[in-house]
Structure formats: C-alpha cells, structure tokens
Amino acid sequence: MNANPYESSRLLAEYLLFHYGAANEILPEESPAGMREALDFAVRTTKHFSPGQVARTLDLGCAVGRSTYELSRDSSETLGIDYSHSFIHAALELAIGPLSYERLDEAKLRTALEARIPAGLPVGEVSFETGDAMALRPDLGDFDRVHAANLLCRLGFPAMLLKRLPDLVRPGGELVLATPCTWLGEFTPPENWPVGSTLDWLTDELARDFELLKVTDEPFLIRETARKFQWTRSMLTVWRKR
C-alpha cells in the first residue's frame, strides 16, 4: 500500500488553515462571494444533526479536529478518529494550547500563523485516536451521532465502512455523510467505485438500516497558495437509524 499522503507537513499546514484559519488568513483581499461562503466547512457540516443533547458522538476522518470539537457542544462524549498520525497529534496539541504552523504563500515564502480552538470548546469530553475507517476497532461501541466528512471517496474499500455503520449508530441515532464524490484511482481502485451515482450507491447500501432525511450540498475551500485554491461542492446526506 502507498504511504499515507496525509502525513506531509504541507498538508498538515493546509488542514490547520482549512479548519482553524480566519477569513483574512485564507482569502485574498478581494475575493468572489462564493469563496467566502465556502469557509468553515468543518463547522457547517456538524450543524446538520437534529437539535438536542446526546451522550456519544463519533467523528470519522476528523483530520485536525475542528469538527470533533464543534460536535462536543451537544455531546457528553465525542471521539475523533483519523488515519493520519500527524493530524491526530495536532488535534491533541490544540487541546493544550495554540499550535504554530506556516502557511505556504509562494515558492519559499511562508507566513507564520497559529491555530487555536475557539473559546469555550470543548464542552463535553473529547478524545482522539488514529484508526482506519475500513477496519475500526471492534470495541468502539455505538453512538447517537456519527459524522464523516470528505472521507468516503478517500478510502480504498469504502463499502467496508458502510457495512460497519449500522453497528456504530444507535437506533434513532443520526449519521451525516459528506463526500465530494471525487473518485480517484490513487485513493480508491476503480473496481471499488460506485457503478452509478454516489447517492444511488449510498441509498442501496444504507436504506435497509437507515432512513434518508436530507440531501444537500456544502461547498468547501482549501487554500494551497496565495493564488491557488480548491473550491469544491460536497454532497451531504443525513440519515436516521431505523
């Protein structure tokens, strides 16, 4: 298997900026409105659960942890899991205090920045661990909420996660899946891609155990350099366990 591309220092800095960067740290002074609307993706995806307090929440593919910390607002216990050791290490460090990193601007030009958790977070208990979403440890237990943003189309065998989801979500619990549906051979062998649309595939795989509540889009923006940005739409679906 190829080395995990998410262990590089460059991607760590990009994701710290993606999750914790202020608008003026990410965007040029004059930027299209669509770019501004695509900020705070790691926060917006967590807002699609039904209101109310729950006991346990799982954040799969949590990266550097912003969504995990946000989910703690309404959860007594929140667990974030990611395959990247450097991402998990950063998420844990942020619980202690601000984390310094360098934003790539151009060539050898860098800007020193600090990532920090918003004041007042976490609310409930938060923990992080490295793990493979296709082979989660068997003793995780079940959860009232499971959140997985931009994870599915980065897995080698995404169907393995879908088969595990019914055991992870409690009856009446909710599942939020967001995916840009950018199926790439470097992450997922083509034989493991959906045959038709990603939405039809998810429905076929999940409908027996879950009721589909919502389908919508959430845009996101990743700044690579001062002049290069990734603007992408992620398809977000909300499901309730039968």
Image: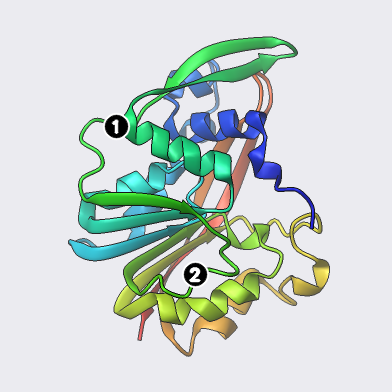
What residue lies at 58% left-to-right and 19% top-to-bottom? 103
- Answer yes or no: is residue 32 visible: yes
The picture quadrant where one finds residue 224 is top right
Check disc 1 and give the amino acid type: Pro
Circle on res. 174: none
- Circle 1 sits on which residue? 118
Quadrant where the C terminus is found in the figure? bottom left
- Circle 2 sits on which residue? 137
Horizontal and vertical percent for residue 158?
64, 70
Question: Mark 2 vs mark 1: which is more N-terminal?
Answer: 1
Asked which colour scheme the image uses, the reply is rainbow
Horizontal and vertical percent for residue 170?
32, 79
* Disc 2 versus disc 1: nearer the observer: 2
Placement of 241 over or under 96, stated as above or below: below
Helix or strand or loop: what does disc 1 sit on? loop
Placement of 143 over or under 69, stated as above or below: below
The picture quadrant where one finds residue 132 is bottom right
What residue lies at 28% left-to-right and 64% top-to-bottom? 56
